[in-house]
Amino acid sequence: MEENKNELELIHSKALEDVANVKTSEDLQNVRNEYLSKKSKLMSLMASMREMTKEQKAEFGQIINKIKTEIAEKVEAKKEELEAKALNAKLEKEVIDFTLPSRSYSKGSKHPFQMVVDEVSQIFIGMGYDIAEGPEVETDEYNFELLNVPKGHPARDMQDSFFINESLLMRSQTSPVQAHVMKAANGVGPIKIISPGKVYRRDDDATHSHQFGQIEGLVIDKNINMGNLLSTLQLFVKKMFGEKREVRLRSSYFPFTEPSVEYDVSCFNCGGKGCSLCKGTGWIEIGGAGMVHPNVLKMSGFDEKEYQGFAFGVGVDRIAMLKYGIDDIRKLYTNDKRFNKQFNRD
Ligand code: PHE
């Protein structure tokens, strides 16, 4: 019994020393195994109680339990100490430095195409026009037939591009919006709209893309004449390209206008003297225009004897290219932020 007590005391003090010396959680686990597990030295001492008297058993049992509890408490305290240390170390390592500059990112900017659309829209909104929208997937009826271009008409050839099935295509021009707006008006004017949007044709070179932009203009009212069209275009090009700019009309042909014209602006680079931008002519082509054909008025529900109208188209990409000196239209559609940024530094 005395011998056992001595051994117990030895184990006790060694255990306390070992716990105190623990540095890591693995050490702690080892210490726990050594002194508190089923195979520990304390447990083997317990086994020796079999040979003791009842009183001795009681006394020895009590001592051994006390020691076990004490070691367990010390181990638990050590565990908490180690955990607290680990947490502090982690917090110290993860300290947030609010003075660090944030990671930089590059901000996008308005696309030159959209800059032109916005500028043109603002000018016409200022003249009292509304903005109208139309679908990019269009019916043959709206893209051609209601614009006085029946099936088999030769004027289809240059626009007859991306058909989805026999009666649906990617619209080749914004002019179908004319028919949509007129039909929605139920034969009652006035109408004054512009309609910016994407159009699609089977084209692909430095100045033609299979996707490009147009802005359609349409005015329908009573007593509308060619003079109204000319003065509208004059006001537009002066606001868009400068007060000194002039408009030139050249006769042309579109099935949905009669008479039809193409309109040019005096070169905003050389003022009309002739330069590389206007290819020496002094004029830059902007788009097509004309008086709305009576058939078109009639087909979309307007009394062609009561109402007249004019329509015009603006080539968005062309203006963007000329204005910003872009040499290849395809650059407008490559989504390169470095390219877009050059035109807009906001
Ligand atoms: N839609 C014609 C084109 O794409 C342009 C145009 C619009 C002509 C309006 C006359 C009137 O070529």
Image: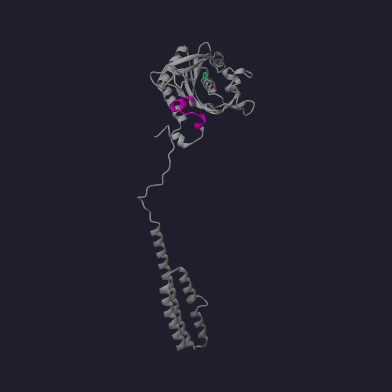
| Viewer-side residue, 293 vs 119 | 119
Q: Residue at x 48, y 73 (%)?
A: 30
Q: Where is residue 60 drawn, in percent x and y?
A: 46, 84
Give percent across and percent down for residue 300: 55, 18
- Given residues 15 and 236, the one toward you in this image is 236
Tell me, yes or no, if residue 190 can be seen here.
no
Q: Is residue 77 magenta?
A: no
Residue 136: where, in percent of width, then height?
Answer: 55, 28
Q: Report whether residue 24 is seen.
A: yes
Say above or below: 43 vs 234.
Answer: below
Magenta stretch in the rendered image: 318-332
**Is 77 located above or below residue 51 in the figure?**
above
Question: Magenta region's main secondary structure?
Answer: helix
Image quadrant containing the C terminus = top left
Tell me the residue at 47%/82% (across/down).
Answer: 61
| Residue at 46%, 68% in the rendered image | 25
